[in-house]
C-alpha cells in the first residue's frame, strides 16, 4: 500500500474522484498548471485538461458562487479557497446560498459541492494564513464541515464529501500537509462522514480534538502515560453533523474530558462539545470539561508557538481533570 | 560555531533533497554567499550563508533527503557560543513540568466521633467554631472544635492522629450529646477503643476572639449543609442507595468523588465508635502499638495570597515596620472579678445580654486611659502631632469567617458595663456575620485583643496601627495564690489572668505602659473600683 | 492584449524625447537611490529567508519604477494604502531599512509587535503607510472611505490605493471603485499590472481589454502607463493626484510592469513563467533604464552605482543584523491591542498563560518545525 503525505493523499483523492466521475471539476486560484500553492492539485490539469481543472480570477465569492451554479446544474465542483483566511468574501455565498438552497426550495435545487481549503497555524503564516474558522461554519445549518488529520482519512473523507449530496466545507490542516505520512489505499474508498475516530484508548481521561491538534494530543497522552494517566484520544473528523453518540460514549467512558482546538476559545467548537456533555452526560462526569484552545486574540506571527496549544498545555489540562 | 539547520523554505515544506554543494569543507565564505542547492517539492533554491566564516563541516551529502530542522553544515563564524544563531528563534527554557503527586489516600478506618458529655450531665452543645478544616491532617490531642455548653466552652481534641475527613455538625448548630460531629480517618493503626477525655478549658464564654495571624484556609467542601460531589458521584450514590452526606470526600476542596462513593459502599461497617466515659481518668495502658509503614503524603494546600488575607498582611507590615513595639505583661488576680462576673451574668441574662469579662476590662481600660492619656490615641503623620483624645473608642479585635476585623465601641468612658456588654454582643454578632458598617471599623483610639478563648498566657500583640497601644487579654488560669489574711499568709486556689500591653515606643514610654498596667491591675483585682 | 495609449517618457537610450521631467535633479537622484535600495533590500530579504533567518519575504524586483514613481507623486500628508509588494513606497517617504527589518524579523521593535507575517508593514510616520492585510483588495474600499473623510473636511489630501492585476477581480475592487465614482472621492487607484497573480497570467485574470478600461464602468478616467518608466509613472500619478486635489474625483492608473521574482519565497515562478517573458522584461529593467536616463543627464555614473550598491548593502545588512539581535516580543503582546481595554476574560487567559509558563516552562519555538 502506498505511503503518502496528507497533501499527497488529497491529490490522490482528487484524481480518484475525477477518474471515476466526469462531472467532478476542480478550480480555484493557481490550482491549474501550478498545481496549487501547496501542490494539492498537482498533475490534475495535465491528466484531465483545463476543462476539468482550471484557474480562476482572484475572487473567492466568484469561485463559490459559480460553484453553486455548476452544482445545481449537474456538475460536482470541488472548489479550492487558497487559504481559509481568504474565504470571507465567499461567506455570503456559502452561508446564505449553498447552505440554505435545499431548504428554501423544498428540495428542488440542491448544491452538492465541496469547498477545499487549507486552514490552521504552524507555518509562521501570521494573522491571515493561520486561522481556524471552523466555528463560523459549524454554526451554519445546511452545511457540512469535515476535517481530516491523517492521509488515510484525508482521501477517504474527501471522496465521501465529493459524493455527498450536500455542500461540504473540507478543511485541510496545512501544518500536517507534509509532516504526516501514512498508508493510503489506492483506488476508491470512503470514510463515512459523521463518524469519529478513536485514536488511542485509555481509561482515565478523554481528549477530543481534530486536525493538526491530533498529533499534539498524542504527544501529551504519551507524556501523561509516563505519569500513570491513561488517555483516550478522539479525532472528531466531522464537526458538522457531529457523531454525538460517539462523543458521549467516549466522554462517559472516563468521565474526565479535555477538548482541544487551535481556534480561539470563546464560542469555539469546544463550547459545543462541552455543552453537549453537560446536557447529556453530566451524571458521568468526574470533573469539569476543560478546553485547551488558542487565545481570544488574532493569530500572532512571531509568538505563534505560544499561541498554539502544545503538548505542555494539553498535559496540564489532562493532569488537572485527572486530579479533580 | 553555527550548526545550520535546513530551514522551512516554503510554507510547510517538510524536507529537501541536497542537489549540489557549491563550496567545500574548509572554504571561506561571506555572508549571503550561496552554499548549497536544495530541492523541495515547491522549488529548487540556493541556501545562502547566514554569516561570514569557514565551512567547518558538511553533514549532508548530495542526493540525501534531509528533514527541515536537521543540521546540514557547521559554519565557524568566529563567535564564541556554540549553539545555533537566529536561523530560527529559539525559546530558551526546556519545559520543567512540575507534576504534583497524587495525594495519598488515607488508609485505616474512619472514626465517627460523637459529641461527648463534657460536663456533668450536659445534654447538648453548640458548635461554636471548627478549629481545623475538612481534609486537614491532625495530631492526637489537637484541638478540633470549640463547643459551648451552659457550663463551659470547651475545645474537643482529636482522639487520634489522622485526617479530619468530614465535618458533620456545622458551626452554629446545636447537637445532642452522643451525636456524631465529625469523621476522622485514622492512618495505619486501627482506631482505639477508648479516646481520651476532651480537655475542658473554661474561658470567657462567647468572648470575641482575636487572631493575630494565620486565619485557617476556607473550607469549601461544605456550604449550607449541602454536599459537594461530582455528578458521577451523585449518580452512583443514587444507584447504590447511599447517603452522600455520609461519604467522606477526597476530591479537591473536599468534593466527593465517584470513587469515594464506591469505596464507601465496599467498605466494612464503620469502626466501633469511641464513646467517652464521663470520668476524666485516662484509659488503661494500651498494648505497644505495632508500627506500620505510614503512607506519607505530598499533598499541599495552596491558596492565593489575595483578598482579605493580603489586606491583613499589609496592615501588619505597616504596623510592624512603623511602630516600635515593646510589650509589658502583667499578671492579675481576677478571683473577685470572676465572682462579680457571675453575678453580672445573671443580671445580664435578665435582659438577654451575655456578660463576658470584656465589659469589665473595657471599663478598666477606659479608666486607665483617662489617667494615662499618653497611651490613648495615635500619631497624626500628616501634621506630625501625637493625638491623645479625651474620648476612648475601643477597637475590639474580632475573628470572623472573613479574617481579623476590628469593630469599634465608641465613648467607652461614658458607658456603663451593661451597656458595653450589650453593644459588644451586637457588634460581635454583626461583625461575624459581615454586617458591620464601615464607619464602625474606624476611629479606634486603643485596641483590645482577646485570645483568651483559644489559649496562651502571654503575647506580643501587634498594634492596630496607627493606634499607640494594644492590650492583649489572656485566659483564666487557676493557680495557687498567696492571700494575705489577718491570720497570715495562706495558699489558696486563685484565678489569674495575664494582660499583655504592646506600646509604640516612638510615642510613649515603658514606664507609662507599666504604670497603666499596674493601674488596671488595681482596678481588676478589686473590681468594685470600676464603679468609680 | 492591445492597449490604449501607453504613457511612456524614457526611451530605451535614456532620452526623454524632449519632455522635461517634473522632478528636480536632486529628486531624480533620490528616486534612483530609492529604486536601488528596493533592489538591495529585496535581494537581502530573499537571502535572509533562504538561510532561514526570516520566515518569509515577497520579491519586489522589477516593480521599482512603479513603486517609486507613484510614491514621488504624493506628499507626506497624503495617505498610502499599499499592497504587500510596495517596498519602494515605504523607502521613498523615509521609512528606514531598520524599521522594515524589525518587521521582517518580527521582533519587539516592530511597529506591529511581531504579530504579522513579514512585509505586512504599518506606519503612521513619516507618512501614513496603512497596515497591510493579506486578503486581496480589502484596502481599496478603505482607501475610498479615508479619502471621503478628507473630502468632507474640505482637505485637499488624497489617498493612493495600490493593488495588483489580481486585485481587480476582488470584491473590494468593485465596491471600492463604485463608491469612489459615486462620491467623486479624492483617491488614486494604482493597479500594478505586473503580469501575474501568483501563477495566473494577467490576460486570464479578466476579459477586459486591459485594466485601465475598467475605469469606464465606474465613471472615472483610466490611464495606462509604462510601469517600468519612473518618469511616466510619476507623471501619471501626479496628474491623478492633482485632479483629486482639485475635487475632480478618482482615477484608475494601470502601470504595466513585470514581477521579476516569484510571488513569494514559497513560490517557484520558473514552473509557470515562460523564460522568454522573463528575458524580454529583463531588457526593460526599470533600474537600468533609469540609470541610462540619469547618465545622459550627467547625473550618474556606473562607478557611482557600484559604490551606492555597496553602501546600501552595508546599511541594509547592518539593519538586518540589528533587527536579528533585537529580542522577540514578550508574551504579553499576544494579549494587548485586541481591544482598547483588555476585557476580563482575556486578562485571565493571559495570566493563565504566564502561570503555565512558570509551572511547566515556556512554549518551545517552532524552528520551522510544526508544533508537535
Image: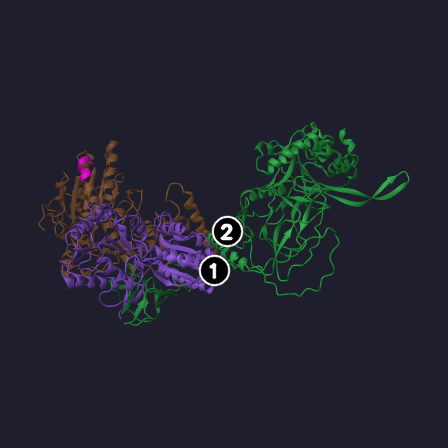
Q: Residues within 10 Å of mark 2 (few under 14, many from 20)?
A: many
Which residue is pictured at 70% across the width and 48% down the height? B117
Residue under pointer 2 = B229
Q: What colour is chain C?
A: brown
Chain A's colour? purple
Q: Position of residue C260 (x, y in %)?
A: 19, 56
Nearest to the observer: residue C306 or residue A221? A221
Relative to C290, does residue B399 appear above or below in the rendering? above
What number is the disc on residue A29? none
State which region is magenta: C178-185
Residue C182 highlighted magenta (yes or no): yes
Q: Is residue C244 visible?
A: yes
**Residue that numbered label 1 is attached to:** B96
**Principal secondary structure, stretch drawn in magenta:** helix
Hue of chain B? green
Q: Count the marks.
A: 2
How far across and down, in percent of the image, does residue B427 sit? 62, 34
Which x, y percent locates residue A11?
Answer: 23, 62
**Image coloring type:** by chain
- Decide if residue B241 is on the left or right side of residue A309: right
Q: Earlier in the sequence, mark 1 or mark 2?
A: 1
Left or right? Give the position of A88 relative to B388.
left
**For the residues tagged 1 and 2, is the chain the same?**
yes
The answer to whether residue B114 is left or right of residue C296 is: right
Secondary element under disc 1, as helix, strand or loop, is loop
Q: Is residue B504 visible?
A: no
Q: Horizontal and vertical percent for residue A29?
A: 20, 54
Amino acid at each position: 500500500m502506498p505511503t503518502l503525505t496528507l497533501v499527497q493523499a488529497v491529490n490522490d483523492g482528487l484524481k480518484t474522484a475525477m477518474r471515476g466521475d466526469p462531472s467532478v471539476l476542480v478550480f480555484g486560484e493557481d490550482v491549474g498548471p501550478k498545481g496549487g500553492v501547496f501542490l494539492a492539485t498537482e498533475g490534475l490539469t495535465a491528466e484531465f485538461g483545463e476543462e476539468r481543472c482550471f484557474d480562476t480570477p482572484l475572487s473567492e465569492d466568484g469561485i463559490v458562487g459559480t460553484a453553486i451554479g455548476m452544482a445545481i446544474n449537474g456538475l460536482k465542483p470541488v472548489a479550492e479557497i487558497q487559504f481559509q483566511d481568504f474565504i470571507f468574501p465567499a461567506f455570503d455565498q456559502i452561508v446564505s446560498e449553498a447552505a440554505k438552497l435545499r431548504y428554501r426550495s423544498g428540495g428542488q435545487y440542491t448544491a452538492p459541492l465541496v469547498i477545499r481549503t487549507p486552514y490552521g497555524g504552524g507555518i509562521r503564516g501570521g494573522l491571515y494564513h493561520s486561522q481556524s474558522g471552523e466555528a463560523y461554519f459549524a454554526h451554519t445549518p445546511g452545511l457540512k464541515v469535515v476535517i481530516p488529520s491523517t492521509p488515510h482519512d484525508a482521501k477517504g473523507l474527501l471522496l465521501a464529501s465529493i459524493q455527498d449530496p450536500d455542500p461540504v466545507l473540507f478543511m485541510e490542516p496545512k501544518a500536517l500537509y507534509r509532516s504526516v505520512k501514512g498508508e493510503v489505499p489506492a483506488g476508491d474508498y470512503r470514510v463515512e462522514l459523521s463518524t469519529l475516530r478513536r485514536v488511542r484508548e485509555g481509561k482515565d481521561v478523554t481528549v477530543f480534538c481534530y486536525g493538526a491538534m491530533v498529533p499534539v494530543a498524542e504527544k501529551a497522552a504519551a507524556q501523561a502515560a509516563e505519569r500513570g494517566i491513561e488517555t483516550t484520544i478522539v479525532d472528531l473528523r466531522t464537526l458538522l453533523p457531529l457523531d454525538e453518540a460517539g462523543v458521549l460514549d467516549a466522554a462517559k467512558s472516563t468521565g474526565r474530558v479535555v477538548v482541544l482546538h487551535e481556534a480561539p476559545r470563546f464560542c469555539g467548537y469546544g463550547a459545543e462539545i462541552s455543552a453537549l456533555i453537560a446536557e447529556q452526560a453530566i451524571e458521568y462526569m468526574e470533573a469539569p470539561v476543560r478546553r485547551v484552545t488558542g487565545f481570544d486574540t488574532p493569530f500572532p506571527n512571531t509568538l505563534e508557538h505560544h499561541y498554539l496549544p502544545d503538548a505542555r498545555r494539553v498535559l496540564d489540562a489532562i493532569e488537572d481533570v485527572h486530579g479533580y | 560555531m553555527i550548526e545550520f539547520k535546513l530551514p522551512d523554505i516554503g510554507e510547510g515544506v517538510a524536507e529537501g533533497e541536497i542537489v549540489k554543494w557549491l563550496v567545500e569543507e574548509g572554504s571561506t565564505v561571506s555572508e549571503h554567499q550561496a552554499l548549497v542547492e536544495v530541492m523541495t517539492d515547491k522549488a529548487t533554491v540556493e541556501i545562502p550563508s547566514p554569516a561570514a566564516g569557514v565551512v567547518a563541516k558538511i553533514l549532508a551529502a548530495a542526493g540525501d533527503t534531509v528533514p527541515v530542522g536537521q543540521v546540514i553544515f557547521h559554519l565557524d563564524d568566529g563567535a564564541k557560543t556554540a549553539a545555533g544563531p537566529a536561523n530560527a528563534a529559539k525559546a530558551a527554557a526546556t519545559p520543567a513540568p512540575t507534576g504534583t503527586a497524587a495525594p495519598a489516600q488515607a488508609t485505616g478506618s474512619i472514626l465517627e466521633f460523637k459529641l461527648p458529655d463534657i460536663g456533668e450531665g450536659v445534654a447538648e452543645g453548640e458548635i461554636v467554631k471548627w478549629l481545623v478544616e475538612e481534609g486537614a491532617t491532625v495530631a492526637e490531642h489537637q484541638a478540633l472544635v470549640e463547643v459551648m455548653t451552659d457550663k463551659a466552652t470547651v475545645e474537643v481534641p482529636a482522639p487520634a492522629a489522622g485526617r479530619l475527613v468530614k465535618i458533620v455538625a456545622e458551626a452554629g448548630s446545636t447537637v445532642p450529646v452522643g451525636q456524631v460531629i465529625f469523621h476522622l480517618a485514622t492512618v495505619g493503626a486501627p482506631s482505639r477503643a477508648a479516646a481520651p477525655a476532651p480537655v475542658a478549658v473554661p474561658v470567657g464564654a462567647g468572648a470575641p476572639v482575636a487572631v493575630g495571624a494565620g486565619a485557617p484556609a476556607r473550607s469549601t467542601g461544605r456550604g449550607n449543609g449541602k454536599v459537594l460531589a461530582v455528578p458521577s458521584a451523585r449518580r452512583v450514590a443514587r444507584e447504590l442507595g447511599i447517603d452522600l452526606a455520609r461519604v467522606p470526600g477526597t476530591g479537591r476542596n473536599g468534593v466527593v468523588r465517584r470513587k469515594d462513593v464506591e469505596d464507601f459502599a465496599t467498605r466494612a461497617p464503620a469502626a466501633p465508635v469511641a464513646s467517652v466515659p464521663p470520668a476524666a481518668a485516662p484509659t488503661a495502658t494500651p498494648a505497644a502499638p505495632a508500627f506500620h509503614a505510614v503512607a506519607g503524603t505530598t499533598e499541599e494546600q495552596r491558596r492565593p495570597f489575595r483578598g482579605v488575607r493580603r489586606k491583613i498582611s499589609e496592615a501588619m507590615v505597616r504596623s510592624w515596620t512603623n511602630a516600635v513595639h515593646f510589650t509589658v505583661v502583667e499578671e492579675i488576680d481576677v478571683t473577685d472579678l470572676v465572682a462579680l462576673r457571675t453575678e453580672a451574668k445573671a443580671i445580664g441574662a435578665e435582659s438577654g445580654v451575655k456578660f463576658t469579662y470584656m465589659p469589665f476590662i473595657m471599663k478598666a481600660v477606659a479608666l486607665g486611659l483617662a489617667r494615662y492619656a499618653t497611651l490613648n490615641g495615635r500619631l497624626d503623620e500628616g501634621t506630625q502631632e501625637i493625638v491623645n483624645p479625651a474620648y476612648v473608642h475601643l477597637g475590639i479585635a474580632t475573628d470572623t469567617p472573613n479574617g481579623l476585623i476590628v469593630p469599634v465601641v465608641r465613648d467607652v468612658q461614658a458607658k456603663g458595663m451593661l451597656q458595653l456588654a450589650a453593644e459588644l454582643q451586637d457588634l460581635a454578632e454583626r461583625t461575624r456575620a459581615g454586617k458591620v458598617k464601615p464607619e464602625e471599623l474606624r476611629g479606634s483610639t486603643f485596641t483590645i485583643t482577646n485570645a483568651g478563648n483559644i489559649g496562651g498566657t502571654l503575647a506580643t500583640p501587634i498594634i492596630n496601627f496607627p493606634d499607640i497601644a494594644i492590650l492583649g487579654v489572656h485566659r483564666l488560669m487557676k493557680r495557687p495564690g498567696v492571700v494575705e489574711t489577718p491570720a497570715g499568709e495562706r495558699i489558696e486556689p486563685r484565678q489569674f489572668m495575664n494582660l499583655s500591653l504592646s506600646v509604640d515606643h516612638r510615642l510613649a514610654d515603658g514606664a507609662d505602659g507599666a504604670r497603666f498596667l499596674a493601674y488596671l491591675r488595681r482596678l481588676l483585682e478589686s473590681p468594685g473600683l470600676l464603679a468609680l | 492584449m492591445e492597449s490604449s495609449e501607453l504613457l511612456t517618457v524614457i526611451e530605451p537610450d535614456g532620452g526623454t524625447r524632449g519632455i522635461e521631467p517634473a522632478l528636480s535633479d536632486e529628486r531624480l537622484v533620490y528616486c534612483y537611490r530609492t529604486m536601488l535600495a528596493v533592489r538591495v533590500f529585496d535581494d537581502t530579504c530573499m537571502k535572509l529567508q533562504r538561510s532561514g533567518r526570516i520566515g518569509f519575504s515577497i520579491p519586489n524586483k522589477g516593480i521599482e519604477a512603479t513603486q517609486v514613481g507613484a510614491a514621488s507623486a504624493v506628499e507626506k500628508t497624503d495617505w498610502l494604502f499599499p499592497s504587500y509588494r510596495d517596498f519602494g513606497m515605504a523607502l521613498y517617504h523615509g521609512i528606514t531599512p531598520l524599521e522594515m527589518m524589525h518587521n521582517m524579523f518580527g521582533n519587539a521593535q516592530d511597529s506591529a509587535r511581531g504579530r504579522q507575517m513579514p512585509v505586512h508593514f504599518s506606519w503612521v510616520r513619516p507618512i501614513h503607510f496603512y497596515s497591510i492585510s493579506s486578503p486581496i483588495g480589502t484596502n481599496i474600499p478603505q482607501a475610498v472611505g479615508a479619502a471621503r473623510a478628507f473630502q468632507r473636511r474640505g482637505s485637499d489630501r488624497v489617498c493612493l490605493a495600490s493593488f495588483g492585476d489580481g486585485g481587480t477581480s476582488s470584491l473590494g475592487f468593485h465596491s471600492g471603485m463604485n463608491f469612489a465614482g459615486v462620491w467623486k472621492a479624492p483617491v488614486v487607484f494604482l493597479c500594478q499590472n505586473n503580469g501575474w497573480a501568483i501563477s495566473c497570467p494577467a490576460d486570464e485574470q479578466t476579459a477586459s481589454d486591459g485594466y485601465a478600461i475598467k475605469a469606464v464602468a465606474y465613471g472615472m478616467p483610466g490611464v495606462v502607463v509604462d510601469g517600468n518608466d519612473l518618469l511616466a509613472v510619476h507623471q501619471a500619478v501626479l496628474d491623478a493626484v492633482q485632479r483629486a486635489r482639485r475635487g475632480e474625483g478618482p482615477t484608475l492608473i494601470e502601470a504595466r510592469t513585470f514581477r521579476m521574482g516569484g510571488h513569494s519565497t514559497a513560490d517557484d515562478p520558473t514552473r509557470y513563467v515562460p523564460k522568454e517573458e522573463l528575458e524580454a522584461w529583463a531588457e526593460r529593467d526599470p533600474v537600468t533604464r533609469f540609470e541610462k536616463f540619469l547618465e545622459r543627464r550627467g547625473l550618474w555614473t556606473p562607478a557611482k552605482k557600484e559604490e551606492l550598491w555597496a553602501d546600501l548593502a552595508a546599511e541594509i545588512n547592518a539593519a538586518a543584523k540589528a533587527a536579528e539581535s533585537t529580542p522577540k516580543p514578550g508574551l504579553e503582546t499576544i494579549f494587548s491591542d485586541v481591544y482598547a481595554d483588555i476585557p476580563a476574560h482575556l486578562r485571565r487567559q493571559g495570566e493563565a498563560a504566564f502561570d503555565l509558563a512558570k509551572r511547566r516552562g515556556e512554549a518551545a519555538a517552532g524552528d520551522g518545525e510544526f508544533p508537535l
